[in-house]
Image (cartoon, rainbow, N blue to C red):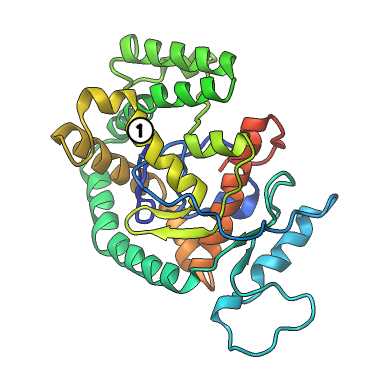
Amino acid sequence: MIVMPLSALLLASVSSVPVTAPAALGSSLLVQANDAPHIAALPLDGGAGDPQQAAPGASQAEAPATQSAPPADNGPANAAPAGAVPADVAPVDAAPASEPMLLRDPWHKPNRDIFAFDVFFERKMLAPLAHGYRAVTPQIFRAGVNNAILNLDEPSTAINQVVQLKIGRALKTTVRFAINSTIGIGGLIDVASAGGLRRRPADFGQTLGRYGAKPGPYVMLPFLGPSNVRDGFGRLVDTFTDPVGFVIGGIFTSPGGAARFAMAGINWREKNDGTMSAIYGASDPYAFTRAAYSQQRAAVVQDATGKAAALPDF
C-alpha cells in the first residue's frame, strides 16, 4: 500500500523516479504513486480520443513557455486563436516522448473545486500537524519513521515489478525488504541502500502504463490530490493487493492501517515544505500541480518501459 496527503494530503512519500525541473518543484498534491497509499477508486473510462503525442525532437527549453501561458480553463469564452489548446486539455511541460504531451482535463471545473477543498484541508490541518511533528521530534527519529513507512511499501512494489516482468528488480526489492525489516530494525534504518540496493518504487498505475494503457482524463481526488483515470484505478488495485495491508489491516478497518495512512501523510508533508511553497507561489497553483503531476507520472511510466532519460530527481 502506498499513501500521500492534501491532495497528497495523505499520500506519503518521495518518488525516486526522475523527472524534469518543473515537476521537481512538484506539489504536495502530487500523487507519487510509488510512495503513497493507494485507495482511490475511479471508473476505467478514459474518454474519447487520445491526447496528442509530443513532437519528436522537441526541446525541453521550450517547455516553460507552455507552462507560463494562462490556464485556458480560467479565461473568457472568447474564440481561441488558431492552434490554441482546447480548454479541457492541459499543457504538460517537457513531457517524456513516450507519454502524451497533453493531458485532457474535461472536468476542470469540479477538479478546481476539489483542489480548493484540498488546499484548505492542507493549510488548516495537515500543515499544522506536520510542523508540530517536526517541532517535537529530532531529525534522526523522523528519518527512521520515513524509512519504516517506505519499507512497508516494498512488498507491493515487488508484486508490480513481477507483473512488469522486471524480475531482477523484484528480487532486489524483496532482498531490500528482508534486510531492512531484520537488520534495519523493522525498516527504521535503510541498511540495504547503504549496501548498494537502492529503492525502485512501482505501482499498478505504472504497470498499466507499461503495457500501453493511456492515462485518461485528469482528476482531482478529495484528500488524495491529483490523479488520472488509469492511476486512480491503479491505486485501488494496489490497496486490495497490498500484502502488508493483509497483515496490519486496512485504512478504514483497523487502527494499524489508519495509523499507517495518517503517519504517511504527516511524514510526507513534513518533508515537503519547499514543494508546497512552490505550489502556493505559482500564479495558478491548480495548473502548476496538474502539469507537474502529469510530467512526473509520464516519467514513472517511462521508467517501467526502460526508456526514462537521466533527469533530475523529483
Q: Residues within 10 Å of mark 1 (few under 14, many from 20)?
A: many
Q: At x 52% / y 19%, what residue is drawn?
A: 162
- In percent of width and height, residue 116 lies at 37, 70
Residue 124 placement (x, y as % from top left): 25, 64
Q: Is residue 18 visible?
A: no
Whether residue 177 can be seen here: yes
Where's the N terminus, which quadrant?
Answer: top left
Residue 181 in percent (x, y) is at 33, 14
- Vertical side of 279 occupied by 74: above or below: below
Q: Residue at x 58, y 47 (%)?
A: 296
Camera-nearest residue between 23 and 229: 229
Residue 298, percent across and down? Answer: 62, 45
Residue 226 is left or right of residue 63, and the answer is left
Q: Amino acid at mark 1?
A: Met
Question: Extreme left residue here?
Answer: 255
Q: Residue at x 27, y 45 (%)?
A: 134
Report the front residue among 278 and 69. 69
User: What's the residue at 69%, 88% (across, down)?
Assistant: 79
Q: Residue pushed farthest right?
A: 57
**Residue for badge 1:** 1
